Image (tube, helix red, strand yellow):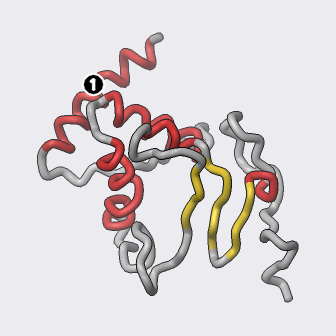
Amino acid sequence: MAHRRLLRPTATFCGASCKGDALVVTGTDAPFVPYAAGLHAELRLYARAGLKPAQILHAATWKSATAARVEHDLGSIEIGKLADLVVIDGDPLATIADADNVVMTVKGGHAYTLEDLGVVPGTGAEPTSEPKPIGGESDSK
């Protein structure tokens, strides 16, 4: 496939950059790629470039928050920071593909299942409805 041939130089550059002092982060501004699907494809690309799962997760969390200058609120789990995170079925530190096995998202103090978000696992689809907090509570009270 042509796109794989085009990605090879990107993967090589990414791998070499991460071995140096470059701030390599995840993220995309591609308008036609669903965010979650694009992010997880990028994580797998970094693995093919030779990065270890811990390096990849660091790029997707703390380094991305640092690049966006929001590391005081996001990027790591610490007292005083926002508790926006995902719960994963698996161990992405052992196998980065496990990062795609999201079973719950916690944002703004509310936990959401994939069903709450209207996401069909494995499709790469964006949410189809507004999220509902677990327990049926809402912020509109």
Please state, as top left, top right, bottom left or bottom right, where the C terminus lies in the image: bottom right
Left or right: 128 in relation to 38: right
Q: Is residue 28 left or right of residue 8?
A: right
Circle 1: element type: helix
Question: Which residue is farthest left?
Answer: 20
> Which of 109 and 129 lies nearest the eye of the viewer?
109
x 24%, y 28%: residue: 12
Where residue 71 appears, as percent x and y from the top left, is 36, 73
Residue drawn 26% across and 32% down?
50
- What percent of the width, then of the height, locates residue 66? 32, 67
Q: Residue drawn 41% across and 67% down? A: 75
Q: Which quadrant holds residue 67?
A: bottom left
- The amino acid sitting under disc 1 is Pro
Total marks in image = 1
- Judging by the rendered image, the residue that carries numbered circle 1 is 9
Residue 17 lies, with reference to residue 107, above or below; the image says above
Left or right: where 18 falls relative to 29: left
In the rendered image, residue 83, in percent from the top left (x then y), is placed at: 54, 74
State the residue lying farthest toward the top. Answer: 1
Q: Is residue 112 left or right of residue 70?
A: right
